[in-house]
Structures are given as C-alpha cells and as structure tokens.
Image: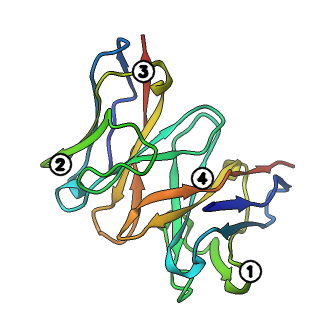
C-alpha cells in the first residue's frame, strides 16, 4: 500500500480547470513532485518543489500544498493533457521515496 | 542533450538475476543521484532505491532490501541496477531517473525504460 493516496480517476471538460490531489502525512514536511505519463512512454516531471515547472512544461500546470494534501492544477485542460498523473515525495521516515497510486485524467 | 539511455529488454527464468544499465550523457554524471523505478503492466510507479554516483552510497526500498544492488562505473557514466532471485511478479518496465539538483525527490530526466520479463 502507498503512503500517498490519489483518486484513481478524474475527468475534466476541454478548457476547464481540474485539480488532482495527493494525500499523505509526509506531505506536511516534504513537497510533492508531479509526473505525467502517457501510454507507452516514460513519466515526465511537470511540477516540483513549492511550485516549479521544468523547462518546456506549459504554465497551465501549477502545484500547491496545504497540510497533508498536495495538489496539481491544470488551468484550461487540453486534449493532450489526458494521461496518468503520479505524485511522489518522501515517506514518513524521510529516508525513502514513495509514489502515489496515480490518477487517470480524462479530458472530455 | 541531457539523457539517460538504458539497456535492452531481458527475459529471465525464475530464480535468475538481471542487471540493467543506464548510461548518462549531456551532464556531469557524478553530480546527480540516480533512482530506479519500476512499473508492472497496467500498474503504478514503484520506487526501488537511489544511488549517489559520486560516493557510491545507496538507499533501497525495504521491499527490495537483500535482492537489489545499485552500482556505477564513473569512467563511462553508467549506473547499474541488479535484481536477484527473480520471480514472476518482477516482470515490469524498469526505469532509471535522475534526481533534480536541490530536489532529490524530483526526477527530472528518465531513461526510456527496460522491459524485464520473468518466465519459465
């Protein structure tokens, strides 16, 4: 079982805003990172730290955190954003990394 | 450009070992941690452990303690992950991923993945 919990599936209408969440006690102490994975491809880092986007990631992706919950927000979702999204962070011991179970995002 | 290139697909019998390589290019290999992450078909991402290529220090997920070994050859900028006592449940795609400078939990560069199939 994962120490980080994500909703298995979320849907959003094209052009609308969607929030994907990640819950876990360790998120009170550590930032989450977020990854996008499309079928047959390696994951891609989209958000890390407080709210940092790697080069090439559109600014419609943003991150936030409150208490034990980290969130990835896509403002104005596009068809190409349909993918699986994973969060990761440190585990409760702080020594190891753990991933959430992933959220499948459908853009309607 | 910055990239990680992994070795090719492997087919192994139960009880055997597999060693996957991950060659770095476009950056200073010893300056960033290398993590290994696996993904069974249709399943989520599972972190296996990390290695500091400069010191050789490692940290493994408890699940893999005693079965996994992460090493490196700095002269050829290559990291290795060896998993022993393979069983069918180890069938998965194995990825190496670089830890972002200053944010070791953020994996900013990923290899293309190596499919490991365990079958008798």
Marks 4 and 1: in contact by CB < 8 Å? no
Q: Residue A27, relative to residue B67: is it above or below?
A: above
Discs 1/2, front? 1
Secondary-structure class at tag 3: loop
What is the distance, in whole Å, between disc 4 and disc 2 at their CAs?
26 Å
Marks 2 and 1: in contact by CB < 8 Å? no
- Image coordinates for residue A56, horizontal then vertical, percent: 46, 44
What is the distance, in whole Å, between disc 3 and disc 1 at their CAs?
41 Å
Q: Residue B70, relative to residue B37: is it above or below?
A: below
What is the distance, in whole Å, between disc 1 and disc 2 at their CAs?
42 Å
Q: Quadrant of the N terminus of chain B?
A: bottom right
Secondary-structure class at tag 1: helix
Q: Which mark is residue A78?
A: 3
- Image coordinates for residue B108, horizontal then vertical, percent: 48, 57
Secondary-structure class at tag 2: loop
What residue is pinned by disc 1?
A: B76
Q: Residue B64, relative to residue A2: is it above or below?
A: below
Question: Who's the residue at 34% across and 16% down the image?
Answer: A12
Q: Which mark is residue B99?
A: none
Left or right relative to A95: residue B113: right
What is the distance, in whole Å, between disc 1 and disc 4 at their CAs?
24 Å
Q: Are marks 1 and 2 on the same chain?
A: no
Q: Of B120 and A12, which appears nearest the observer?
A: A12
Left or right relative to B36: residue A86: left
What residue is pinned by disc 2?
A: A68
Q: Label 1: chain?
A: B
Q: Of B8 and B30, which appears nearest the observer?
A: B30
Q: Earlier in the sequence, mark 1 or mark 4?
A: 4
Asked whether the viewer can see residue A1, the reply is no
């Amino acid at each position: 079982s994962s120490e980080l919990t994500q909703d298995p599936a979320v849907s959003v209408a094209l052009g609308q805003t969607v929030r994907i969440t990640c819950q876990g006690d360790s998120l009170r102490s550590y930032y989450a990172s977020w990854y996008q994975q499309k079928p047959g491809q390696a994951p891609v880092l989209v958000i890390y730290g407080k709210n940092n986007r790697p080069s090439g990631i559109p600014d419609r992706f943003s991150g936030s955190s409150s208490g034990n919950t980290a969130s990835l927000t896509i403002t104005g979702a596009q068809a190409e954003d349909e993918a699986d999204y994973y969060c990761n962070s440190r585990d409760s011991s702080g020594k190891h990394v753990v991933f959430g179970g992933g959220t499948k995002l459908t853009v309607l | 450009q910055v990239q990680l290139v992994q070795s090719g697909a492997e087919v192994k019998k139960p009880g055997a070992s597999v060693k996957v390589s991950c060659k770095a290019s476009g950056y200073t290999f010893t300056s960033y941690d290398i993590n290994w992450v696996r993904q069974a078909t249709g399943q989520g991402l599972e972190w296996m452990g990390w290695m500091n290529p400069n010191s050789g220090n490692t940290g493994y997920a408890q699940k893999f303690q005693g079965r996994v070994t992460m090493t490196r050859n700095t002269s050829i900028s290559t990291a290795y992950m060896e998993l022993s006592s393979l069983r069918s449940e180890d069938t998965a795609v194995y990825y190496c991923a670089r830890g972002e400078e200053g944010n070791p939990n953020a994996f900013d560069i990923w290899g293309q993945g190596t499919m490991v199939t365990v079958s008798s």
